[in-house]
Amino acid sequence: MATTMRPDAAPSPAHHHHPTYHEVTRDIAATLGHPKRGYFILFGFVLLVLAAGIVALLYQIRRGLGVAGYSPPVMWAVYVTTFVFWVGIAHSGTLISAILYLFRSAWRTSVYRTAEAMTVFAVMTAGLFPLIHLGRLWYAYWLFPYPNQRGLWVNFKSPLVWDVFAVSTYFTVSTLFLIVGLIPDVAAIRDRATGWRKKLYTITALGWRGADYQWRHYVKAYLYLAALATPLVLSVHSVVSWDFAMSIVPGWHATIFAPYFVAGAIYSGVAMVITLMVPLRKVFRLERYITVVHFENLSKLLLLTGMIVAYSYLVEYFIAWYGGNPIERATFWNRAFGDYWWASWTMILCNGALPWLLWFRKIRRSIPALFVLSLFVNLGMWFERYVIIVVSLSHEYEPYAMGNYTPTWVDWTILAGSFAWFFMWFLLFAKNFPTVSITEVKEIIPWPRRREVRA
Amino acid sequence: MSGHPGGVLAAFRHVDDAAQAIRDLRAKGFADVTAYTPVPNQEIAAAIGRQSSPVRLWTLLGGLTGLGLGLVMTLWMSLDYPIVVGGKPIPSVIPYIVIMFELTILCGALATITGLIVHAVRSRRPAAFDPRFTDDHIGVFVPCAPEGRGAVQQLLQAAGAEEVRIEA
Amino acid sequence: MTDGMNRRKFLKVLGVTGGGAAAMAGCSTERVEKLIPYLVPLEDQIPGLATYYASTCRECPAGCGVYLRVREGRAVKVEGNPDHPVNRGRVCARGQASLQGTYNPDRIRGPMERTLTGTFAPITWEAAITRVVERLKGAPAGSLWFLTGNEGGSFDRLVRDWLSALGSSHAVTFEPFAYEALWQANRAVFGIDAIPSYRLGDAECLVSFGADFLETWLSPVEHARGFAAAHGYHDGRMGRYVHVEPRLSMTAMSADEWIAPVPGTEGVLALAMAHVIVNHHLERAPADAVQLRGLLQPYEPDQVAGRTGVPAETVHRLAAEFAARPSLALPGGAGTQHRDAQLTAVAVNLLNYVAGNVGRTVVFEPAASGGNGSYVGVADLVAAARRNEIGVLFVHGANPAYATPPGLGVAEALAAVPFKVSFARCLDETAALADLVLPDHDPYEQWNDYTPRAGVRSLLQPVMQPVFDTRQTGDVLIDVARRMGGALGARFAGAAPEGGYKAYLQERWGELQRELADRRPFDEFWREAVQRGGVWRDLPASPVRVARDIALNPPTPTGGGRFTAIVYPSPTLYDGRGANRPWLQELPDPVTKVTWGTCVELHPDTASGLGLAEGDVVEVRSAAGAIEAPVYLYPGLRPDVVAVPLGQGHTAYGRYADGRGANALRLLGPEPAAFGGVVRYADVTVAATGAHVVLAKTEGKNRQLDRGIAQAVTVAGIAAGALEHKFHLPEAAPIPEREERILDEVARKQREATKYGPYAFETSRWGLAIDLAKCTGCSACVVACSAENNVPFVGEAQVARRREMQWIRIERYFEGGGPGEPLEARFVPMLCQQCGNAPCEPVCPVFATYHTPDGLNGQAYNRCVGTRYCSNNCPYKVRYFNWYDQSTPDDPRTFAWEEPLHWLLNPDVTVRSKGVMEKCTFCVQRIRGAQNEARVAGRDLADGDVVTACQQTCPADAIVFGNLTDAGSRVARLAADPRRYRVLESLNTQPAVTYLMKVRNLGGEA
């Protein structure tokens, strides 16, 4: 891991006054176990919403997709929107845990664990929607190339099959990455825990002792996982964007989609990290480890990607105008001033306008402000996908077949259920595994030594 | 603790002491010293002195396997049951690149993990352990016959170990 | 057709099993739930192969000849009888849906009588007939009335014989669209009590004064054929058609020019044209035309311009065109039956006369028997009932309780009749008032004949075992007669002892045979007639002269209400008898594209003046009554006119009709006009109710945003080379060369793989050509497609969400209509274009949609997982998704095949399940069927061997299907026509559907 990094290079809590290794272990271990009433109430509420979502889904399976609001020509709507939304959320996690790791940026250490966990759970959530939106989800396995008596394989030319491969790969790799990162921490907790938790951690630590022969391979493996995850994360959202870009739907068929979607994904993901981190830090009293510095860095990331997204919005309209294709133009005119003007302007306001506030240091360093902003970005990014998908479909080539769409309670309930599903996992994780990496935080704290370092 | 050969176990607070102790021990011919650290540490690693890990080979081979698998699978499957869609060639390699890429990553990652487990387990040596080593101490374990333990104990104490224990 | 010997065996068996079963059980269901619904297998019934039986469509008085496609003893599809002189093998939308009447779940399943509690209870036929006999014995002869629809054949004769034998003469015929004005006018002007046949095919200049001749007027299918012949574009020449009516009807949408006069003044306009002709253009006029100058004097164009709102120069121009070429003027239809309808008809007769059309395009044959009866007849019946002069009333084939203005008080009057017997097949409003209901066979279950016009005797034969425990009314009447004995019994004792009505019918046909001087044995004559579906011959036209004494009663001034309401017949539901056919309910109205309900058409300017938007529910109130219905904004109206279709607002008549929409008849006064018909114009006020609904219409935008979906040129334009300048397409077989290679490769592999050997036609590229110059938007193809391909109906709520499933839709776009520019409507039948480069194919992850070696865009329903990506990627939006399970009874809320409707299902086509995508397949089952036949016969497919359902029924012959790679095929020739274009071809989807531009004849030298 960050073995080549000189501690003093880290803009880390270590700067102000280093907590000792023991303090680190103690403070972070303290966040685990012994939930209070508040936690159970919150968890109960989450389960309730999840149950509602499941009921809605079962109802939809029983009666047919018709119970959702679909109205042709809008054949994809809230479900695909939410799929793209959650996949996007996942991306910043990998960015922080893998890409920033390769860049050796020290500040990531105390935030990456939360981000990585968020990634895994977000992908778990996203992965549900391609199934939920299927007309016959009980045949979803037909999308995998497996030998069958029809002698038929899948269509590798279909972006949806690319999706199957990209998303399942992404889920596998980011899960492995999370687990590998957890092992030393779990071992540290194991050596402190008592009772059934001790048993749990003894098993999950896989016999980790931090011995030199373990570290030796561990460090390399972690490095290469990060190296693999980096191109993967870029590919996944590119592939997701190609679900649209590969079609001939005006408003979808655009070359900028891949970079535009990747930027948007990281943008929404960082926002979600902030949304999660702010309350987490309060509740777990981690102010000492997750400081304003971290939030400022996150908000700089937010600013950067936000600017890219805003630029993409402008470019889309510019190209529609410059390209001069009347059908393309009509689509974008409809997007801005048609029946869905409100959705489009919500997205432009939340994603294109508000992040400009981040140019001000004051805002970047004000945690409440960032929290509020991050909520707006989350909202805006959901609407971005809604606008791209629903509004484009509602206004295609055949004027006689144009038409609008309004979601039903089923759409909304399943959407809510997906958030519940995500937060259920996150809450379980937060109370049973360290949401801040013990090992990596320690790494940026210099070891006590008897003699001065010989330069 | 049992299941390991007897020896001397020391816990250090200071990394330079620990490193020095390991170097001295190896100078005295104790080859298989085991060092425990809560975080990876290059000084210790250097003192122990082992060559770099072979895990990266696993990654490379895994990745290449995935690439080949992707190529063969997509081509063979589309030729095995040829179906024309949208007037595109039956094997169209360019769209298949996506599949090949994803499989490269997937197999690469899986191979890396396999490599990690295989090597970590194979190079494992039985040794005594203390919970503090995952917290804030550096552990050094020297397996040695009972008669040699006194000397080792002295050496470690001299090196500045906070605590030295004879492990039967 | 199989030969008659076998059929007669077949029918004998039907009789036996049917009778036996009827005796066994009153309730039909357990009888019919057998897979093969007859006991003794028949040598002419090969499971899996269809048998065709000729019959006659009785959905309207036009009397088109049909073939019934019968599979395993069940009729599954109606197709036109190619020999039949009325429709020459084509059928309209209502005819295509007629089987939904046969299999209607709301058909009366057996005889019923009214109990003391006022509800109906089933009784046996025996008891029912005894009851009738008792009542007849008790009733004085004069108090015996019989009300029928337009039966126009032996049954009509039977009723009259039967009545006269009972000493009564009160046989009343009631047909809602009886064209009384036209009959009167023909009597007045030509002294002939008949309706002529209008030869649209010979008319180079056609002017319709409000006749919806492509929708309901007289014989729409016949007219469509003639119209297509005369008005279709044939190398540089086409007829010209001008429509005169305040509303742009579906028929008018095919016109080259639409003139919207002040409501009620079409006649005046016609007279003005006649005036111009008798004074300036006598080239073609008969000698005595000049005598009419005096009569026409007051109608000098400048004089009447004020009244009609049509400038004099227009009249002069039209008159000149009209007189210059073989022309034809058509008098107003049921939709323009205003107070002056008779004046219109008289005027049109005069106009035709002075233009020399009578005897050329207006041909009078000796009067057909029966006729349409008259509204006055019902009015008399009601009066008689009120005076308690009716003791026993029989009603067959008529529904006056619904189809007359409520003000007439049919229901109240019938309440005064002590004993009412209905022979209705469905419990309609009138049957609901009856004391005894003796359900008749469906026309496709019975022996009968019908005479649509002189010289044409069309036969009906039972094509299958009756669905329910019904009996043919003719048999019932004869049975009653026998039991009555006396004069009546004597009259029918003669008829072959056991024969019943069939024997009576054959007697009539014996007479016909003698009339025709046919020397063959009767059996032979009869068998041939049954096989062909009837006998027909051309009668000599009877010469007519204009009467000396014609009085033109001056038109009555309009006034009163703020708007004139036009109550017009629905092209889909006719007078309302179609309302219990879900296919017709879901068939978008060709003009408004609204389904499953009534809407009030308002001009957009009028609506904005009233602050109304589409879907706002308004109350339309006249002196007679009021209705409430949502507004539809329709630019094809005079701003001072509102229009409401007939056909909805039933208060009975089954689940699909009952309580749906509003009955526009409420707006009309009950008192008959001078000519004896209902006045279908009313002075009304329109007021918002504050309510708002989402219209269940299939139309998105009604303008094509310059996307060239529906293209048109003018005759003059073509002459000026407009077509040379347009972007040119690759010639036929529009498949990219590379793909062709691949396809051949795949075809070869598939042939190696299949053990059935090669297809009879290997290298084909199926294609369709649609001539928009012929398409009238009548939508027959839509229903035909649904019937052929088991397309379910989804109901109003789903259509409101745009989830209709019809595989072919008629898109209707408007052009122009701005200030100063004429409004033009264009129809485009839109179906799967079977693209060569289909965008839907590559995006499907599971190969559910793919390209077949013969160039079809295949769809494997059972492979589809329902990602719906294909539909997103289809530029034409012709893929339809099964949002619910329409195909299984598990979900009654969405089940589209309520028993026994499911007997309609075509066994050759998969019934799609929940969650899969479906679309037009070019009737692949017909293609494969024809290929198999060809293979068995060891020959190649010839052009025309494969006929798709839409092509088969198209009355205008606008749709042509075939193999594009066969240079000689009709479709290949059309695909190379200079007028050809393909929709959105800039996308390089290489559609297999070629459209031929609509051509408009703007008059002038063209």
Image (cartoon, coloured by chain):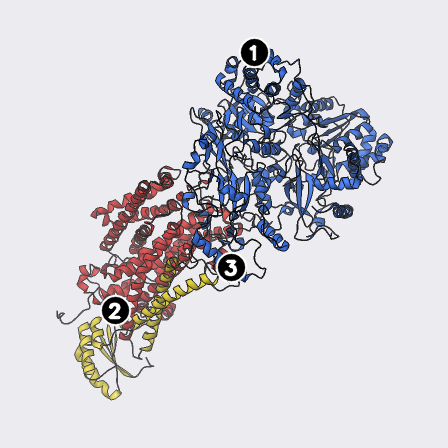
Chain colours: A red, B yellow, C blue
Q: Determine the secondary structure under disc 1.
A: helix
Mark seen at residue C748: 3
Circle 2 chain: B
Please state which of residues A297 and C343 is positioned toward the viewer in this rendering. Answer: C343
Q: Is residue C286 above or below residue A197?
A: above
Mark closer to the chain start, 1 or 3 = 1
- Percent from the top left, x then y, of residue C879? 49, 46
Q: CA distance from mark 2 to mark 1?
A: 113 Å
Which residue is label 2 attached to?
B39
Left-right relation of A130 to C370: left
Q: Residues within 10 Å of mark 3 (few under 14, many from 20)?
A: some
Q: Nearer the viewer, residue A184 or C470?
A: C470
Q: Disc 3: which chain?
A: C
Residue behind mark 1: C298
Is C743 on the left or on the right of C395, as rendered?
Answer: left
Quarter-of-image position of residue C473: top right
Label 1 packing within 10 angstroms: few (<14), some (14-19), many (20+): some
Q: Give the crowd class for mark 2: few <14, some 14-19, many >=20 residues within 10 Å.
A: many
Q: Which residue is pictured at 57% across the width and 31% down the height?
A: C662
Residue A294, image x and y in percent?
A: 24, 55
SS class of the residue under badge 3? helix
* Disc 2/disc 3 C-alpha distance (Å): 66 Å
| Label 2 SS | loop
Identity of the amino acid at label 1? Answer: Pro
Q: Is residue C485 left or right of residue C1003?
A: right
Chain ID of residue with mark 1? C
Identify which amino acid the numbered label 3 is placed on: Arg
